[in-house]
Amino acid sequence: MIELLRAPALGDVPHGFAGRQGGVSTGVCAGLNVGLGSEDDRLAILRNRDLARDALLPGATLVTVRQVHSPDVVTVTAPIAEDERPEADAMVTRTPGLILGILTADCVPVLFADREAGVIGAAHAGWKGAISGVTDRTIAAMEMLGATRGGIACAIGPCIGRASYEVTLDFAERFERDDADNARFFSAGRAGHCQFDIAAYVASRLQAAGIGRISLLDEDTYSQASRFFSYRRSCHAQEGDYGRQISMIALPS
């Protein structure tokens, strides 16, 4: 059975953070792998996408983009064919019947909704996108559709947790050069390394942008192999490939 995690901040807006449970893929991508960039069987991936869509909103159209670790956002007004997906890492829409889907395997999925304005968004916030402002740009794009910062609620889904996310000191210094206060998101690790709380960093960006309602699910993808895909875990296990899970939000027709 597909597990869809929901966030209190988003209320009754149709949304869900899926893991790997409930799909038809086998091997290292076993479960609900929706990543077209993996080496998994394409028919299995497409079936998994249909299963994920139907678990959230049967009859709706799933829309995804070619994620490239950018801060770029696209406004979606109609379905997008798989071979026409633009390169971007966030989407916004006010069109009912569309499911915005973000794929992750350790990076931070963020879902946005201004229920009163009827505007939603979804962002893929890896560290590159997060520090370059993908969430800020998503909020700005939602405002262009009529949303307000005071009306937007956000949810941060399963991602790699601080205990699992070891980075170098040079990596941490890059964030501290951007803002000295970012030091609080790094804790001591083994020699020459530290642990990064990327979910807390993304939450702080949302708060600084004026978002007052934020749910943080606090689910570590790396440490829960039976529930979530993890790029870092697959690398450490030398598996050669990895699956991607999907986070979705929609406006009902």
Image (cartoon, helix red, strand yellow):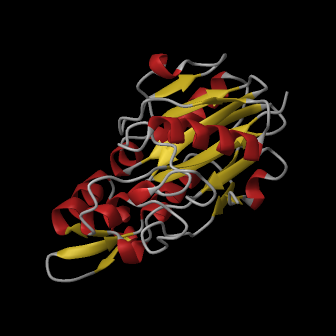
Query: Quadrant location of the N terminus?
Result: bottom right
Picture coordinates of residue 98, whole percent (x, y): 71, 28
The reply, left or right, for residue 17 in relation to residue 64 is right
Viewer-proximal residue among 205 and 7: 7
Picture coordinates of residue 128, whole percent (x, y): 33, 46
Viewer-proximal residue among 110 and 117: 110
**In this view, 132 is above or below 184:** above
Q: Residue at x 64, y 22 (%)?
A: 144
Q: Residue at x 59, y 43 (%)?
A: 48
Q: Report if residue 200 is visible in the image.
A: yes
Q: Report if residue 122 is visible in the image.
A: no
Residue 96 quadrant = top right
Residue 54 quadrant = top right
**In this view, 198 is above or below 88:** below
The reply, left or right, for residue 12 in relation to residue 199 is right
Q: Residue at x 69, y 39 (%)?
A: 53
Q: Residue at x 18, y 68 (%)?
A: 169
The reply, left or right, for residue 108 in relation to residue 239 is right
Picture coordinates of residue 24, whole percent (x, y): 57, 51
Query: Quadrant location of the C terminus?
Result: top right
**In this view, 5 is above or below 10:** below
Picture coordinates of residue 70, whole percent (x, y): 37, 35
